[in-house]
Image (cartoon, helix red, strand yellow):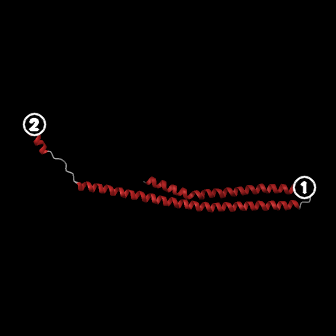
Amino acid sequence: MSRTKTAETIENVEFPSFDASKATDQIRAFAEKGVEQSKEAYAKLKTGAEETQKALESTYETAKTVSSDLSLKTISALRANAEAGFSHLEALIGAKSLSEVVELQTAFLRKRVEMTVEQAKDFQTVASKAAEDVSKPIKTAFEKAIKEIKVA
């Protein structure tokens, strides 16, 4: 009897059928989705790299311009210092007395201190603007990247 029940049970049991076409469609859909996600990731990476390249090029050009401005400012200061020194030397050569030499020297030193303070202020202004201008493209690119990350 138990043998009969076993035969009947086996005849009544249905095994699930495997439809290969459905599995193929699912695998294809999965692969297509993976390819699409890879394309999107590549596009984002490419865009990010292009934006970074533009920011670096802009930074380089700005640094070059700023460096030129600082160099011109330095040359101008050196020229002014040299001219002041030669003028002072000419005045000292033309001095008639020791008291006139002391007076010329005192006036020259006072003017040199004032000139040095003024030049330092100019350099500080130019250097501050330079640092701001050079960092601006990178700062802008960084802020844009942070916004994109927050959106995603």
Return the mark for residue 24. none
Quadrant where the image shows the C terminus: bottom left
Instruction: Please tell me how crowded label 1 is: few (under 14), some (14-19), or many (20+) other residues with Cα within 10 Å.
Output: few
What SS does tag 1 mark? Answer: helix
Q: In screen coordinates, is 145 left or right of 10?
A: right
Q: Earlier in the sequence, mark 1 or mark 2?
A: 2
The image quarter containing residue 68 is bottom right
Identify which residue is drawn at 46% across, 60% down.
47
Identify which residue is drawn at 48% across, 55% down.
145
Identify which residue is drawn at 64% across, 60% down.
67
The image quarter containing residue 139 is bottom right
Q: In screen coordinates, is 120 left or right of 37?
A: right
Name the amino acid, label 2: Ser
Name the amino acid, label 1: Ser
- Residue 1: where, in percent of width, then height? 7, 37
Q: Does the residue at mark 1 contact the one at mark 2 (Cβ under 8 Å)?
A: no
Q: Which residue is denoted by mark 1 in the rendering?
A: 99
Front-lying residue, 109 or 44: 44
Report how many numbered discs are placed on residues in the image: 2
- Residue 71: where, in percent of width, then height? 68, 61
Front-lying residue, 9 or 88: 9
Q: In screen coordinates, is 49 left or right of 62?
A: left
Q: Which residue is denoted by mark 2 in the rendering?
A: 2
- Residue 37: where, in percent of width, then height? 38, 56
What SS does tag 2 mark? Answer: helix
Identify which residue is drawn at 40% across, 58% down.
40
Which residue occupies the extreme right position in the image? Answer: 97
- Residue 72: where, in percent of width, then height? 69, 62
Question: Which label sits in the foreground, 1 or 2?
Answer: 2
Disc 1 to disc 2, C-alpha distance: 138 Å
The image quarter containing residue 7 is top left
Q: In screen coordinates, is 15 left or right of 121?
A: left
